[in-house]
Amino acid sequence: MSEKWIAGVDLGGTATKLAFINMEGVILHKWEIPTDHTNEGHNITKNISDAINERLAELDHPKTKIVGIGMGAPGPVDYETGVILNVVNLGWKDNFPLKASLEELTLLPAAVENDANCAALGEMWTGAGEGAKNIVCVTLGTGVGGGVISGGSIVQGANGAAGEIGHITVMPFGGAPCNCGKTGCLETIASATGIVRLATEELSKEGTTGGLSELFAENGKVTAKEVFDMARNGDVIAQKVVNEVSFHLGLTLANIANTLNPQKIVLGGGVSKAGNFLLESVKENFSKFAFSAVRDSTELALATLGNDAGVIGAAWLIKNKIKL
Amino acid sequence: MSEKWIAGVDLGGTATKLAFINMEGVILHKWEIPTDHTNEGHNITKNISDAINERLAELDHPKTKIVGIGMGAPGPVDYETGVILNVVNLGWKDNFPLKASLEELTLLPAAVENDANCAALGEMWTGAGEGAKNIVCVTLGTGVGGGVISGGSIVQGANGAAGEIGHITVMPFGGAPCNCGKTGCLETIASATGIVRLATEELSKEGTTGGLSELFAENGKVTAKEVFDMARNGDVIAQKVVNEVSFHLGLTLANIANTLNPQKIVLGGGVSKAGNFLLESVKENFSKFAFSAVRDSTELALATLGNDAGVIGAAWLIKNKIKL
């Protein structure tokens, strides 16, 4: 019997990532299509189905090559029913039956999960988790997402809202407003947006000097990447911002670890591209605030799959279901 | 076939609680024996075995009445091997093979687990958890313990240190020293000891007045219970202490809920006897800091089993193993 594949899909606001993945979690083909929000989002699953069929035809494989389709979507998902509860930016109305729609159009078994959870499952399967069954993944991107894996399965939570690590309150007083309606969430500090906000606040003070300040004067803005690059070069303002981010991230992760003592906490997303420079600084704070037995056993690591984590984790949903 | 029983044991520093419990989690007989620390702790399991045999003889039941013995012990336990990793106050050396010792002496299948985790399992089985499979229990006693249950099972953690909720850092700067070696842990504020410390600090200031201040002047000390009683009666200093405790507890529990979105968070231990007065105040803070979907779905509740939670949860370890 020739090797079977899984279709992994990672739905984003502007682009949808697709991949054919084998049973060992290796990506064999990957590509992207635009995400079409029109028609109340009904084109989204139609386009995914068409894209899979077209690609299979190009590769001269029958539909039976694919054993199922796993998909990650932004927003809370009811894993059991495959219903996506609410997504503001994709056209879908509340409680869109994503799994049913995929199955109807592709005639394949489907499984859907929140995208941050898919990224966590991907890192568990073939990434930084290296097969560990108890890990926490934190995605530091435009926002801050999270996925908690216990005993090899995603912790869903009573309302599909487990893993909302970005909305842990780190500044109970005087914190910045968060998109979620609260203030002082981790996301207001440790996301790319939060880092830019902190830097801009510092740079807007009177009499700032240094490389970051010069960039700010030149471009009227700075990026999170510039903050890290400048901090690495010793820029005082940039270092102050990185220290604040690392403090809140290290403290929060230590407190999560005091609760769950996972084998690994994996940091992914665009901000994590700051690499070991960020990781070491977070680790230093983590060590200060972790309970001794936790400090000795919970490891902090950088994600290794980059943008592929989502499609790989989505494919894992099918792999785990069929236990081939 | 006559009803089978499970022996549940809850090991404490001064007394060991024992109970015969049926398969529905109902306590039929319960009693206590002193905990004997001498002989490097080897008398502990011997005395438990003898106590069970004597009680069975008194009740005129054969040993076969009991299907197994479940036991909770203070300190980190490796659930798989039944080894208690380190306990300072019971005479045992590190890595004491508690399960093996119990099985050798009682000739019954044994299972051991950390005592806070047993209390959590007890509340899940027949207490405030009411069968919910995803709950977090926090025991507010002399210290603050915790147990995290996901999918009906205790989350053990990489090093048996999951559930160390008492050692979540709530005051990263200027916090009081904790027994664990860190400072500013939740335990330094929300335990009975922490509440007394906060009250004593307030009462030691110049020019304090009110009922709690009078009690302090009279007795040279106050208890956590007195702090709650006085706060309920409107004493300003006592209310200030309760507000601080509720703030840190509500914030911490909201952040745990943002991570895990459990169906219930159950508050137990001596301090929780303050009842709805404490619960309502904690809930108010919880609501402020919980992510909206979490606020709507994670419920805070008081433990209902009191001191029986430990033996009932210990018995559950056997119930769960044998699936009778």
Image (spheres, coloured by chain):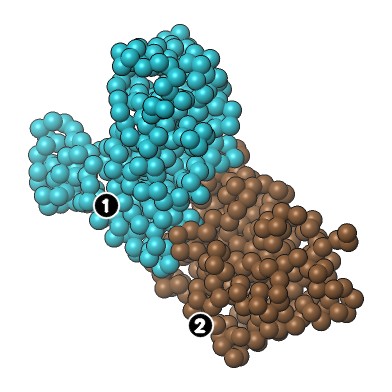
Chain colours: A cyan, B brown
To the question of a shared chain for discs 1 and 2, the answer is no
Residue drawn at x 68%, y 68% is B109
Mark 2, other Cα within 10 Å: few <14 / some 14–19 / many ≥20: some
Q: In the image, is A225 to the left or to the right of B62?
A: left
Instruction: Answer with the quarter of the image where residue A140 lies.
Output: top left
Query: Which percent across, then down, holds residue B61?
Result: 87, 73
Secondary-structure class at tag 2: loop
Query: The N terminus of chain A appears in which quarter of the rendering?
Result: top left
Q: Front-most of B79 and B141? A: B79
Q: Front-most of B178 and B315? A: B315
Query: Which percent across, then down, holds residue B320?
Result: 68, 56
Is any part of residue A273 visible from this angle? yes
Query: Which percent across, then down, holds residue B37?
Result: 61, 87
Three-letter amino acid code of the residue under disc 2: Lys
Compared to residue B26, the image places residue A192 above or below, namely: above
Secondary-structure class at tag 1: helix
Q: Chain of mark 2?
A: B
Residue underneath mark 1: A279
Separation of residues labelled 1 and 2 (CA atoms): 37 Å
Q: Chain of mark 1?
A: A
Three-letter amino acid code of the residue under disc 1: Leu
Residue drawn at x 39%, y 44% is A124
Compared to residue A231, the image places residue A41 above or below, namely: above
Compared to residue A59, the image places residue A194 above or below, namely: below
Q: Front-most of B240 and A100? A: A100
